[in-house]
Amino acid sequence: MNPFQLDVDELEKKARSIRRKIIRLNADSPAGGHTGADLSQVEIVTSLYFRLLNCAPDRVSDDDRDIYIQSKGHAAGGYYCCLAEAGYFPEEWLSSYQHNDSHLPGHPVRQKTPGVELNTGALGHGLPVAVGLALAAKRDGRSRKVYVLTGDGELAEGSNWEAALVASHYQLDNLIVINDKNRLQLAGSTESIMKTDPLDQKWQAFGFSVTQCDGNDVASIVRTLEALKAEGQPNVVIANTTKGAGVSFIAGRPEWHHRVPKGEEIDLALKELADV
């Protein structure tokens, strides 16, 4: 059971708090960050950690806990802010993001950060490992679900589609893939760099049950994930998001893939994200 089980209004407040942390975290990082990717996923990770996942800071070794894998590892900053908000480690650690000897490196590392399940960053690795974990849970008779968050550009990696074949073959209905579809990668649009649409038809062809939601709306995410009932099929939720969501001058701008707010931008972003 999730220890928080927040309602939609409370989840929205959490998401706003996490966004403020992301702005401060990236602004203070000596090695930059991935502000756009961090912000696009906020409602997804908030809904998971504060309502949906059967896991908690005091159950990180529980064999029956749900597993979450941050496959889009470059968005580690947003992931860390969510884990800190949920109590997996002290919030004071956020100020050490990407500093020497930090518990919070530029990509998730299981051996360094409490709550992290898998070292990620080399795109295309998260889903194959998630498939293995879901298959093991099935064979061991465990009730856990395995969630994995992928990015847009990551789906150009062939390892994902090999893993999808395996997931379908073994009917891994305990696997939930969430695609953070913000339609941007690196310095441009996914459409121009490496087209993936029609994405829903691709997943269906690989044997997945496919649903879509507004990935920047916690009500839509919760409603969609709680309604998943596919039996004998792995699930994929295409979460339609905006890269940089929540901050007007960052949203939808490809240059914020690997840019962080500086100077007046910090104050402007925090002003937009103030509680209302």
Image (cartoon, rainbow, N blue to C red):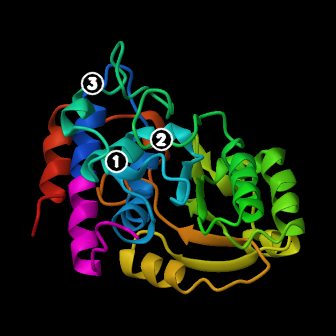
Q: Which residue is at a point 39% across and 68% down the rendered structure image?
A: 47
Tally of marks: 3
Q: Upstream in the sequence, badge 3 or badge 2?
A: 3
Q: Main secondary structure of the magenta part?
A: helix
How far apart are the alpha carbons under marks 3 and 1? 15 Å
Nearest the eye: 109 or 239? 109
Is residue 272 or residue 81 the one in the foreground?
81
- Which SS class for mark 2? loop
Q: Locate residue 45, reporting x and y percent.
A: 42, 59
Q: Residue at x 61, y 70 (%)?
A: 238
Q: Image quadrant of residue 206?
A: bottom right
Question: SS at mark 3?
Answer: helix
Q: Dot 3 surroundings within 10 Å: few (below 14), some, or many (20 or more)?
A: some
Query: Rounded to the nearest whole Å, what is the CA distance between mark 2 and mark 1?
Result: 9 Å
SS class, disc 1: helix
Q: Is residue 261 visible?
A: no
Q: CA distance from mark 3 to mark 2?
A: 17 Å
Q: Which mark is residue 83?
A: 1
Mark 3: which amino acid? Answer: Ser
Q: Position of residue 64 (x, y in %)?
A: 54, 60
Query: Which disc, if any, is residue 96?
Result: 3
Q: Earlier in the sequence, mark 2 or mark 1?
A: 1
Q: What range of the chain is rendered magenta?
A: 1-18
Point out the image quarter for the C terminus.
Answer: bottom left
Discs 2, 1 touching: Cβ within 8 Å: yes
- Taking the image as shown, residue 54 lies to the left or right of residue 10, namely right
Residue 116 circle label: 2
